[in-house]
Image (cartoon, grey):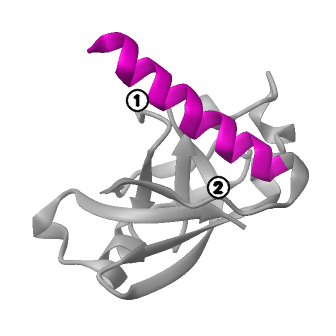
Amino acid sequence: MKRTARAAGALVSAAALSFLFSGTASAVSGTASYYNDAGYGACGTQINAATQLLVAAPAGLWTSPNPNNDPLCRKSIRVTHNGRTITVPIKDKCPSCPTNKIDLSQPAFSQLANTSVGIINVTWEIV
């Protein structure tokens, strides 16, 4: 079971990294939660996840030892849930997220579902 989960995670990560460097979109089926922290995001800028539209990408997709210089900081994620689609800039890293899960800011999540749900099934891609 663990081996299958690891293989699936590696496949998702490889697909996302393939997009980053080739420009070919590869949608990921996964989940999204939300957060509302404020401070400095992984890209080195001030963020407020309680008021701004942004997303924290899974830690496994970051490729630079200094996240401020990571190519992800110049990308966005297009997220779809129940026929609704939003595109939000990557401004932070989600250290506890597996490679198929993203952490949306509270206002971004609210555009897709009620925050009382907590976690939603989504498809997403780096754009």
Residue 40: in magenta span:
no
Given residues 123 and 47, the one toward you in this image is: 123
* Residue located farthest toward the left when viewing the structure as drawn: 116
Check residue 96 in the rendering and tell me which mark sits there, or answer none: 1
- The percent position of residue 67, horizontal first and vertical second, equals 75, 34
Height in image: 37 above or below 67? below
Q: Which residues are magenta?
A: 1-20
Q: Residue at x 61, y 46 (%)?
A: 40
Height in image: 101 above or below 25? above
Q: Is residue 7 left or right of residue 106?
A: right
Q: Residue at x 58, y 58 (%)?
A: 47
- Local secondary structure at mark 2: strand
Q: Are marks 2 and 1 in contact (CB under 8 Å)?
A: no
- The percent position of residue 110, horizontal first and vertical second, equals 30, 78
Q: Check disc 2 and give the amino acid type.
A: Lys
Of the residues tagged 2 and 1, which is closer to the observer?
1
Q: Residue at x 35, y 84 (%)?
A: 111
Q: Residue at x 39, y 87 (%)?
A: 84
Height in image: 73 above or below 3? below
Q: Residue 122's image quarter? A: bottom left
Q: CA distance from mark 2 to mark 1?
A: 16 Å
Residue 16: in magenta span:
yes
